[in-house]
Image (cartoon, grey):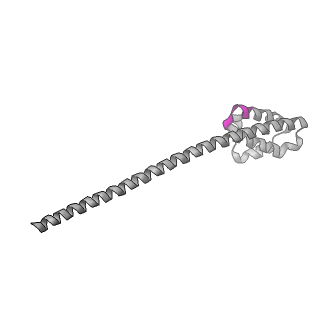
Amino acid sequence: MLKTLSTIKASELEQSLMLLPVGYVHLMIPAISQVLENYPLSTELSVRCLHGLMKFHLPSLSLAKKTELKTVADLAEMRCQELKDTIGFNLAGLRFLNDRKVEKEEIEEFREMLGDRKRKKRKRDKALKRAMLTLSV
């Protein structure tokens, strides 16, 4: 099911779910639950399918399926939170690496400026020594 859903274009997914017969809707809810449990990286697709099913077919679902929907929704929320945590951790790591890179660039820039000053001072000192030697001769 996951492979089939992933081949559907995002723009056509909602239409496909809207045209889905009610019998298949009842079969898809447990399948989405299985996908959420076993394939955490497919959370986005699963949540989009679940949202589409609830948007178009919620009135036709029986009370028993509504409790199953509640458990699937809780599982989806948990998976989404896990993804947010992962993304937040990765983002913090990237910011840290970027800050270190900027800091190293600033240090290198400072060293270059400091080196230029030292070279200019040496040139000035040599020129002054040459001028003094020329005057003294």
Residue furthest to the front in view is: 136
Residue 23 visible at all: no
Q: Residue at x 83, y 45 (%)?
A: 56
Please identify the dominant SS of the magenta region: helix
Residue in the foreground of this view, choosing between 54 and 110: 110
Residue furthest to the left in view is: 137
Is residue 71 shown left or right of residue 97? right
Residue 93 locus on image (x, y percent)? 56, 44
Q: Is residue 39 magenta?
A: yes
Residue furthest to the bottom in view is: 135
Residue in the foreground of this view, choosing between 92 and 78: 92
Residue 28 locus on image (x, y percent)? 79, 35
Q: Quadrant of the N terminus?
A: top right
Q: Residue at x 66, y 37 (%)?
A: 41
Is residue 83 shown left or right of residue 98? right
Residue 115 locus on image (x, y percent)? 32, 55
Q: Residue at x 70, y 31 (%)?
A: 38
Residue in the foreground of this view, choosing between 129 and 95: 129
Is residue 17 shown left or right of residue 66? left
Residue in the foreground of this view, choosing between 30 and 105: 105
Q: Where does the magenta region start and end?
A: 34-41
Q: Quadrant of the C terminus?
A: bottom left
Q: Does residue 131 lie above or below 114 as drawn?
A: below
